[in-house]
Image (cartoon, rainbow, N blue to C red):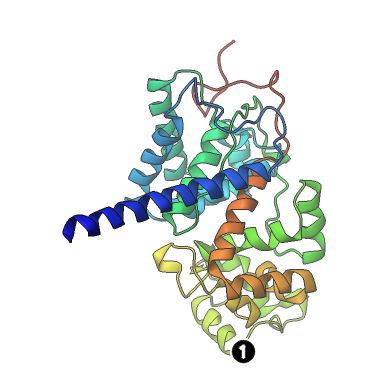
Amino acid sequence: MRASMWWQLLLSMLALVSSCAARRIQAEATIELPPPLQWQFYQNSCPDAEKYVRDQVEFYWKQDRTLAPKLIRIVYSDCFVKGCDASVLLDGPDSEKKAPQNAAFLGFTLEVIDKIKEVLEQHCPGVVSCADIINLAARDAVVLAGGTSYPVPTGRRDGNSSTAKSVDLPLQAVSWGSVVPYFQEKGLDVQDLTTLLGGHSLGKTGCQFIADRLYNFNKTGKPDPSVDPSFLSQLREQCPPNSTNQVYLNPDSGSSYNLGKTFYSRVLNHRAVLGIDQQIAANNDSYQIAQRYDASFEDFKKMFGRSMTRLGLVKLLPGDQGEVRKNCRVVNAK
């Protein structure tokens, strides 16, 4: 009887592995890759590259769970400026790191990327680009934060320039009408926008970024009327005027640093922290997507992975441009 139970367990595990592999193959088949990206680009040159990245991300995530939202944020901060070329990692007196929009993930997060690169250089010198490390590490962070694994094509090239003035990421409150075309310029759509905003179920924001919603919405001297009154009171307690405190983007699950199931429910009930998140409920297409994700957390996790894959395809350097940096902080010596 015991042998039979173990055999059934083994069969179940094999079926699960086969199912995951089938879903991955299906996901890969539905995404058209721009050059120079490929699936399993390092299969011959560094076959264990993804394992090296995953092991390091897991090791450091166990020390500091805030690593997950910061690694996810770096993909956006890198790809939306000059494209996915790891220019955000370059040091310099006027590099992208110096832009105020990128202050949130400096320090420990970049040290983790340095360590990943160090390990890869030990095993496969000059092979794995920093731009690929960013995307692979973010995928592993999503999984550790309770998300679903998703395919990451590789073969990106690293850029050789970085300037703070090139960073045009929104710093203050923005309207839905301006964000949608901003995403469309990058080849992403309303579904990607609505889905990627679900990443705000992780991490914190500074009170200075929501002060207008709480006290002076659109310079009216009044709070944002879309905020639930009881939630407004809670936020005002945490963020008195001129406060530099931080608040969780999803108060229900923030302290766990896991993707929370209630993000879209909060949006639909006017209890989102950020104004851009609350605007999901004010537009028909995004409202319907939010309803769908609120009804199925598994659907959201699957689509979040899809949108992260699409985000990693933005404006890639051709294969004959750029380089594979030996140190993610500096361009290679000529």
Q: Which quadrant: the N terminus?
A: bottom left
Quadrant assignment, res 290 = bottom right
State the image coordinates of residue 21 (x, y, percent, origin top left).
50, 45
Q: Which quadrant: the C terminus?
A: top right
The residue to which callout 1 is attached is: 229
Q: Is residue 127 depicted above or below 112 in this figure?
A: above
**In-image side of 174 versus 228 (left or right):** right
**Residue at far left of view:** 2
Residue 272 visible, this angle: no
Task: Provide the secondary structure element on which disc 1 rests.
Answer: helix
**In-image side of 290 versus 133 (left or right):** right
Q: Is residue 274 depicted above or below 28 in this figure?
A: below
The tally of labels here is 1
Residue 311 visible, this angle: yes
State the image coordinates of residue 236 (x, y, percent, origin top left).
55, 81
Give whichever of 324, 20 is nearer the camera: 20
Q: Is residue 159 depicted above or below 190 in this figure?
A: above
State the image coordinates of residue 292 (x, y, percent, origin top left).
65, 72
Q: Residue at x 52, y 29 (%)?
A: 329
State the image coordinates of residue 272 (x, y, percent, origin top left).
61, 75
Q: Residues within 10 Å of mark 1 (few under 14, many from 20)?
A: some
Give whichever of 63, 298 is nearer the camera: 298
Q: Is residue 267 depicted above or below 53 in this figure?
A: below
The kind of residue tagged 1 is Pro
Q: Residue at x 49, y 63 (%)?
A: 259
